[in-house]
Amino acid sequence: MKPAPFSWHGPASVAEAVSLLAEVGHEGKVLAGGQSLVPVLAMRLASPAHLVDINKIADLAYVRTDADGVTVGALARHRDVERDVAAGAAQPLLAQALVNVAHPTIRNRGTTVGSLAHADPSGEMTCVLALTGGSVTAVSVRGERTIPAAEFFLGPLESALAPDELAISAYFPRAAPFSGSAFVELSRRHGDYALCGVGTVVTLDPDGAVVSVRCGYLSVSDTPLVLDLTQAWAAGPEEAAEVARAAVDPADDIHATAGYRRHLAGVLTGRSIERALARART
Ligand SMILES: Cc1cc2nc3c(=O)[nH]c(=O)nc-3n(C[C@H](O)[C@H](O)[C@H](O)COP(=O)(O)OP(=O)(O)OC[C@H]3O[C@@H](n4cnc5c(N)ncnc54)[C@H](O)[C@@H]3O)c2cc1C
């Protein structure tokens, strides 16, 4: 199928983009890497009359790391984030998760902020934003606002962004001292969306005792699910797996049954925590 006809706009600045978005309102869509939107248009699951293509706004193509964390501009491609050494040192979960996102060709074009705006509960970066307690900053003609991860994902493919808002950046806090992280997932073929994925952050005290175990889940709930498994892990790996299995709410689809995904949530919880714990201790 071919997309329905649309008008293309190529603003050269954020101000121009938000003014266009205000003008076209519900009839418009932002085009970033196009790796999710173009298939949606081609299948006519959406038929916006206007596409506001942000690829000419060079100011949005950055990955910046400071003492607090990593800020990713709306035109930073997944691959830019994955390969950024300073970002990887500040928040290792970014690269740990990104290597699981599709294939390098798709990561060369798809943007991390676009992935968050798409709000797919099977997306690795939605899980990382939720697990790290990050945020998304958006701009419209009404001004700028920063939306915490806990308020950003409203449902499958539904974010808190208004139709006239442009997400300009995402912020991922720096990993805490004495912490370690890991990201594990299972998919039918390498590069496919995960049947289930688990990201983990383990934090130790200076003596090496575990003080916090938090896991984020993808593909097993409508919005990214984050669990505090500190108590459960202290009771043993099987207890942590049981808490995870009870908390997830997967659906049956052509790729896997809900029961299998639930089983995976338990198994991958253990693997992810073990790996994060080993990293925290090195
Ligand atoms: C074969 C294939 C496999 C894939 N596998 C995975 C996978 O395993 N894991 C995964 O996470 N992703 C996967 N993806 C999706 C990929 O990560 C996309 O790049 C990403 O989801 C969307 O980013 P994009 O820049 O391409 O956004 P687009 O496709 O351009 O946009 C996606 C949506 O977000 C909106 N949007 C984009 N940017 C903004 C912005 N700055 N402000 C407001 N709204 C915005 C658009 O209007 C649109 O609704 C896959 C894609 C393909 C084609």
Image (cartoon, rainbow, N blue to C red):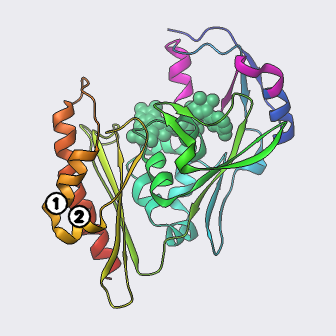
Q: Which mark is residue 239?
A: 1
Residue 237 visible from this viewpoint:
yes
Residue 220: give x, y in percent of width and height: 31, 39
For disc 2, the marked residue is 232
Q: Which residues are magenta?
A: 22-44
Q: Is residue 27 magenta?
A: yes
Q: Is residue 128 magenta?
A: no
State left or right for residue 195 relative to residue 70. left
Do residues under tags 2 and 1 come within 8 Å of each other at their CB atoms? yes
Answer with mark 2 or mark 1, whichever residue precedes in sequence: 2
Q: Which mark is residue 265?
A: none
Real-space Cα separation, disc 2 to disc 1, in angstroms: 5 Å
Question: How many marks do you count on the picture?
Answer: 2
Mark 1 residue type: Glu
Q: Is residue 202 above or below residue 223?
A: below
State left or right for residue 194 relative to residue 99. left
Q: Is residue 88 above or below residue 49?
A: below
| Residue positioned 50% across, 57% down in the render | 82
Viewer-nearest residue: 121 or 114: 121
